[in-house]
Image (tube, rainbow, N blue to C red):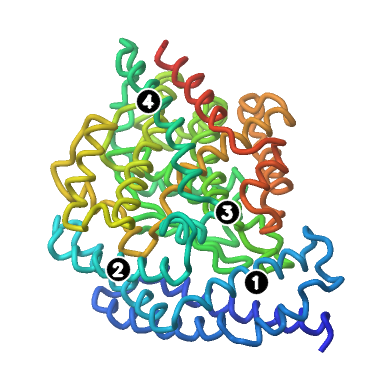
Amino acid sequence: MTADQAYQWLEQHSRETVYLEAFSALANWDQATYIPRKGHPHRAQMQATLAKLLHARNTDPRIGEMLARLEGSDLVQNPTSPQAVNVREWRRAYALQTKIPERLAVELAQATSEGQSVWEEARPKNDWEGFKPVLKRVFALTREVAEAIGYTEERYDALLDQYEPGATTRQIEAVFGELRQATVGLLQRLEASPRKPDPSLLHRHFPRVAQEAFAKEVIATLGFDLEAGRLDTVAHPFMLGLGPGDVRLTTRYDEGFFSMALFGTIHEMGHGLYYQGLPSEHYGTPMGTEISLGIHESQSRTWENLVGRSLGFWRYFWPRAQARFEAFQGVGLEPFYAAINTVQPSLIRVEADEVTYNLHIMIRFEVELALLRGELEIDQAPEAWDAKYQEYLGIRSPTLADGVMQDMHWASGLIGYFPTYALGNLYGAQFFAQAERELGDLQELLARGGFATLLEWQREKIHRQGSRYWPRELLRQVTGEDLNPRYLIDYLNRKFGALYGV
């Protein structure tokens, strides 16, 4: 068999595998949106069966044979060519999958599918005792996965690398240390300022029908193709890209609070724009795939915050919002802009402001790292969680539902995932600064409705690159620098210093 034939086999095998993964993703979307309450046990069995089939495909010995024929051939001499990128990522995935026994892959798939349904039932009831056994099982299986994969320094590294290729615990701790110090200092200055926004403007009556219509108007204007996607309602919003032409966004509504649905929808739309911008001709191969969750998050946080909470954005959309919502009649743009950028330590991560958000991520990172290291037991997690909220944000949750049980990630097996949220903020600020250097004053651009210009910049620099570069290398290619937390720190100080007069 020639190198060309080996590549064609791998390409076909990869595409067929991705179609099966899309079925699994569709089942996840349905489980989060429309599944009957009694359908969860059956769905867990479906997912376990799919996991078994996928594990068999991903560990097929023929993959290793074909890769061996390709590596070193003329096809992969240019390391940034689609063929070389695909072979590199196929090898990485194959090396990972072959280390995880089928029994473990199936058990984890079933445990996390069951975990999601248990979390959905337990959180509203504040039922920690009912949720704890599931969490113990998921963490135990995840430790097994980390040990099976192997690591040099930290068990956590084996998990983190699956979400953010090349990242290590040591790197994350260093960057988070600098960001934490700067964030706490800024928060203290803002809290001491006598100038305070009036967030009550956002707590009026906003009919759900009007919220949904406005959200769809906004995301369509920003560039999301609603003929290639849809928007649904869930308990914990997310985005799923099922394939070219099918991107599922989800959100949640509160008729007494304006910000939750709109900014949550814009956030998920940012993920969706990234997915819709991937090179569809490479679908089914790594070259047509997002490179990391941190880069993914940089796109969602850019549109949610750097764009969506900016003054330029609202100079364009404010008249449209006032036309949709009677509650905004007589409200000025400046008070509204200040209100949506209120800085207030809070318990709920997904509702946190830009300044305090990263502290939520650091808390989760530190707790799950301690759990993985064996320095903390699941039984001790609620108290450890609350203690860190008290230390970093000066608040403590009266319920576990708004404390250690608020996120679905651990129940879903997404351990090693949380740092990517803060990395997304860091990458996003650095990308945005580079876009401004190249495109000019972005606030003026947004105020004119020039959203397509910014999106096309992202398409060219980030989306169409697929998995060509690992995250830090992509950052260097786009900005000419390695990861530099000063971009985010300086942005936060400029924006909120001006708003609060400090």
Q: Is residue 119 left or right of residue 486?
A: left
Which amino acid, mark 2? Ala
Q: Earlier in the sequence, mark 1 or mark 2?
A: 1
Q: Nearer the viewer, residue 200 or 235?
A: 235
Q: Secondary structure at mark 4?
A: helix
Residue density around tag 4, few if under 14, some if 14–19, many if 20 or more, within 10 Å:
some
Query: For mark 2, what is the residue?
Result: 140
Image coordinates for residue 421, horizontal then vertical, percent: 45, 46
Residue projecting furthest to the front: 152
Mark 3–mark 2 Cα distance, whole angstroms, equals 24 Å
Residue on which disc 3 sits:
166
| Horizontal side, residue 331 vs residue 166: left or right | left
Say whether disc 3 or disc 2 marks the residue closer to the N-terminus: 2
Report the residue at 53% width, 23% height from top: 490
Displayed quadrant of residue 258: top left
| Residue under numbered circle 4 | 339
Where in the figure is residue 245, as x and y percent of width and height? 62, 65
The N terminus sits in image quarter: bottom right
Question: Cα distance, mark 3 to mark 1?
Answer: 15 Å
Mark 4: which amino acid?
Answer: Ala
Residue 330 appearing in the image: no
Residue 171 in the image: above or below residue 82? above
Marks 3 and 4 sit apart, C-alpha to C-alpha, by 39 Å
Residues marked 3 and 4 touching at CB (< 8 Å): no
Residue 394 is at least partly visible in this image: yes
Give the structural element (helix, strand or loop) at label 3.
loop
Q: At x 16% / y 57%, what residue is drawn? A: 379
Measure the alpha-carbon separation of dots 1 and 4: 49 Å
Location of mark 1 (residue): 91
In three-dimensional space, the C-alpha distance between marks 1 and 2, rounded to whole angstroms, equals: 27 Å
Q: Earlier in the sequence, mark 4 or mark 2?
A: 2
